[in-house]
Image (cartoon, rainbow, N blue to C red):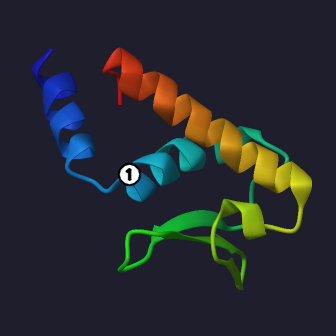
Amino acid sequence: CLACLKRAESFARKSIAAQINNVLQERLPNSPYAGRGITLVETPDQGVVVRIGVEEYPGVEAVPDPEIRSFIKEAVAEWEARTRRGIR
């Protein structure tokens, strides 16, 4: 469908961090982490900062809560699967 193609093109123009953050945001409302303010933000050097509320961590591995770290990694895995299938 034309709307689907436009959405896919728009998604493809976003950085990888932004694309993964989109997947994360889709997953958050139905998770135990809803309302925690978890976001991924790309840094100027193409790294990623994980924001959880007002706290910031320099990458997923720096997140101290292993369950939140795992939840973010699940979003990354979902993004990878969608990318392989061409569904964004």
Q: What residue is at 15 percent from the left and 25 percent from the top?
A: 5
Looking at the rendering, which quadrant does residue 37 occupy? bottom right
Most extreme residue toward the left is: 2
Q: Total marks drawn?
A: 1
Q: Secondary structure at mark 1?
A: helix
Specify the quadrant that holds the N terminus: top left
Using the image, determine if residue 69 lies above or below residue 71.
Answer: below
* Percent position of residue 60, x then y: 68, 61
Can residue 33 be seen in the rendering of this structure?
Answer: no
Q: Which residue is mark 1?
A: 16
Would you say 31 lies left or right of 27 here? right
Q: What residue is at 10 percent from the left and 21 percent from the top?
A: 2
Using the image, determine if residue 22 lies above or below residue 62.
Answer: above
* Percent position of residue 14, x then y: 27, 54
Would you say 24 lies left or right of 42 here? right
Specify the quadrant that holds the C terminus: top left
Would you say 88 lies left or right of 41 here? left
Which amino acid is tagged 1?
Answer: Ile
Most extreme residue toward the bottom is: 54
Q: What residue is at 14 percent from the left and 33 percent from the top?
A: 6
Can residue 82 be seen in the rendering of this structure?
Answer: yes
Looking at the rendering, which quadrant does residue 29 occupy? top right
Q: What residue is at 38 percent from the left and 28 percent from the top?
A: 83
* Percent position of residue 79, x then y: 49, 35
Using the image, determine if residue 54 lies above or below residue 57.
Answer: below
Dot 1 alpha-carbon crowd within 10 angstroms: few under 14, some 14 to 19, many 20 or more: some
* Percent position of residue 33, x then y: 80, 53
